[in-house]
Image: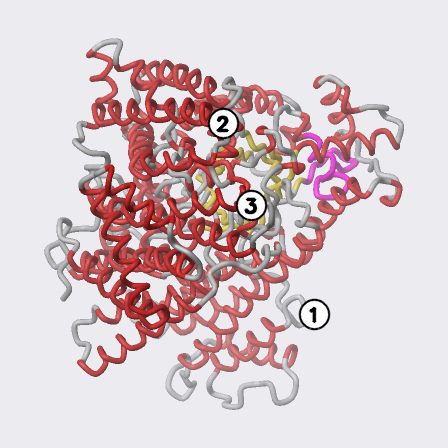
Amino acid sequence: MIHVTADNNSLLRNDVKKLGNILGEILVHHGGMPLLEKVEAIREKTKNLRENYNEELYKNLKEEIISLKPPVRQQVIRAFSIYFHLVNIAEQNHRIRRQRQYQLDGTGNLQPVSIESAVASLKASNFSEEHIQDVLNDLSLELIITAHPTEATKRTVLETQKRISNLLQQLDHPQLSNRARTDVEESLFNEVTALWQTDELRDRKPTVLDEVKNGLYYFDQTLFEVLPGVHQELEKQLQGYFPAHTWKVPNFLHFGSWIGGDRDGNPNVTPEVTWETLQLQRKLVLTKYIDAITDLMKRFSQSTSRVSISDELIRSVEEDELLYLEQGEAWTIEGEIYRRKFAVILKRLRNVGQSEQGYKSPEEFSNDLRSIQASAEFHLPANNKLKTIRKLIRQVELFGFHLSTLDIRNHSGEHETAIAEILKAIKITENYGNLSEDEKVSILEQILNEPRPLLLSIEDYSTETQTVLNVFKMIKKAHQEFGRRSIEVYLVSMTQSSSDLLEVLVLAKEAGIYRLHADGKVESHLTVAPLLETVDDLIAGPGIMKKLFEMDVYRNHIRERGDHQEIMLGYSDGSKDGGTLTANWELFKAQKEIHNMAKNFNIRLKFFHGRGGSLGRGGGPLNRSILSQPAETLGDGVKITEQGEVLSSRYLLEDIAYRNLEQAASALLEASANASKNMLQGYLREKSWEAAMEDISKQSLQKYHSLVFKDPDFLTYFKEATPLRELGALNIGSRPMSRKGSERFEDLRAIPWVFAWTQSRQMIPAWYAAGSGLHSFASKSPENLQLLKDMYERWPFFQSTINNLQMALLKADLQTAREYINLVEDQTIAHRIFQDISDEYNLTREVLLQITGNQELLDHSPNIQESVKRRNPYVDPLNFLQVNLIQSMRESEEKSEELLTEVLLTISGVAAGLVNTG
């Protein structure tokens, strides 16, 4: 048995050393001993600098790095980049190792934040079975994968990394023979060699369909198997801890997608592309079902000569064979009824969407499976269940024939422009865009209360308006072809008024997705959800929604959607607009206020948290993200984006995917149960805490605005002191870096904003101005500092905020960041702004340590702390090289493809080293 202790990461260090040695051998093979010696010399110096800073050593290191020339320079860059990929693999393997140790532990110690620990906690809290079942019935967690930014690592590289991880796991097997060990180590060497010999940069920007296929990869590799596993584990633990109750665990955990449906700022997402996305999703899920049925066919060999099978099932098989099978397609052994039924099922699955012989709905398919399950389990003891077929039934319930629900998103301005053109064409108003909000709402209400359609022939409108209308026509067609679960939500980005949502409802009406019948009956098959992004929008959010809920026409639409409203909260633009601390507080307040307001209308809200992977865009562990929300909002369900950059770290490996989802599910279950009884600490937050946050946020916002919006030189500093200009060539996403191709700060997307700061190690979107707010409040009195300590101890929201700030400061590195000011043309500007950033960093670090009582940042998370410290020394050389290469490239009059390639390699390497892009 492998023994792992919390304070001993020797097995992890052994893995890192093993992989590092293999990489060293490969470097010698491809570049000779001089290459290895050069890499080792740089590595030793950077490590020594971290342990004992010395100005002379620092200058010596810089000179050695700057003196590198092609082709050695590119090999050195790649050596450090690939080292990070190997460290990432080793750390994931160690996480799996720790997880398995808990499973093998016979002492009764439960793994923290596991499904079993959550159920055990419910038992210890004396919750009744009925109360837990009620909580389960309302439990809902949706995770939505997105493509912005897409994974910076190519899929070929990901697959190699997965094979390396599997080989490392094999080496842990206690019964591995010497011969087998030798074979595994040889394979490991070959896979690391393949990693070195693979071009890690894409040769072109991915298309939207490339991004779709990248997203589907995770459904194919892990999610299809892991999702039912999480549900089955919860059912098993509940049955174990509460054996007197017959448990029914609903399908509370779902995955959806934006990839292929997110039109906001991406002209490449056409209605045709969205349709093809839905087809690709259906093709994959049908393939998975066909594979599963083929496997079940091998297992279900029972014969009527050995067991009795219900007459009803035998009759259905005989009827189905006549109805669906051609000559020679039926199973030939008459007494193997289950196999005969599976042969029919296979034929019908292969014809879904192709002919009348295919299943019309996933419910038809699951009913056939249930008939087999009921018959087969009739001959088993009462407490024995057939796990394989039950798992497949669960998969059909989770994934249907659509695989994952596809959200559609577009900018509010697109809808307003289309509505304006339509209303002008039919002579309702000459210039809709210039009307007041009340006038717009009045016209839109009138249209929605009128059963007749508005539209002239679609050819009478501009190409832009036709495209908007065709999106809604496509949604209607998708509902007919793939089922209504295929597209359920239409998100309106930059929602700033009630009319922004009513406009979408009008467009849905014209496509027949929303209908008012002559008898007054309303049909509505699409949830219209606002996306509140900026700080101003978050503040206005409660008023926007209240106005809609007071309208009969919108209230009727909501009633048809089950008295349920979804609201998306944007973490990226809010942070870019007001700084991370203010953005997080305004998000918290908006949720609380909108929730309380909706409660008065008996409307249930589901908040959709648009979190990024990086800290500057609301990133962090899933379970902590859930717990940091206002506790009273959890009962209506939680929806969170899973950004492209975190997909590989969370869902590439089955064990890691399971652990990630288990943590999220257990946190939501326990928090929802406690919140429903007002027992959760976050639910009982004190008024003094909220007053403190209000004060802190106000000071933080002032500080943030003083630099980002009021300093006339800030934008110049940002564009020159980061690799912003170079990011566009990295080919990591199909979407442009800014809206409308504009150079304005307001139109710059939050992703390159965060990505550029992360690369330069300044990372200001993740922490800047928080220190001023916290310090201003804490310095007013000793009581205030004690209050912050209490908030950190007892309030999940504040604890999550402070811990994320600690992580951001630990990953940032101002000594390295100082190098980037050399890229700024006006050095006076560079030094002045960098000094402000440095002062704020030191202030933030000081106050965080005071609040947490730590000696060093993240003392409470030694594994994460060690991981960051393990990486930082080896990121430095890539940063030094990046600055030098960017300087050369910007100064050169001629475009150098070789220089650009090397810059992009450093960007990719830094992203791998920090485990963050944007």
Find residue 166 and report its horizontal and vertical position in percent.
Answer: 32, 68
Q: Is residue 514 magenta?
A: yes
Query: Which comes before the other along the chain, label 2 or label 3?
Result: 2
Q: Which residues are magenta?
A: 502-523
Find residue 146 and report its horizontal and vertical position in percent.
Answer: 52, 48
Give amino acid for label 3: Ser
**Residue at coordinates 41% horizontally, 79% vertically from top-left?**
300
Query: Which comes before the other along the chain, label 1 or label 3?
Result: 1
Question: Which image quarter: residue 768?
Answer: top left
Disc nearest the viewer among 1 and 2:
2
Disc nearest the viewer among 1 and 3:
3
- Give above or below for 455 relative to 445: below
Q: Which mark is residue 356?
A: 1
| The N terminus: image quadrant | bottom left
Q: Which mark is residue 892?
A: 3
Residue at the disc numbered 2: 826
Left or right placement of residue 528 versus residue 899 in this view: right
Find residue 805 and report its horizontal and vertical position in percent.
Answer: 32, 32
Residue 143 appears in the figure: no
**Residue at coordinates 83% horizontally, 30% vertically from top-left?**
423
Q: Is residue 108 magenta?
A: no
Give the SS element for disc 3.
loop
Give amino acid for label 1: Glu
Left or right placement of residue 907 versus residue 488 in this view: left
Give amino acid for label 2: Asp
From mark 1 to mark 2, how far is it between C-alphas? 71 Å
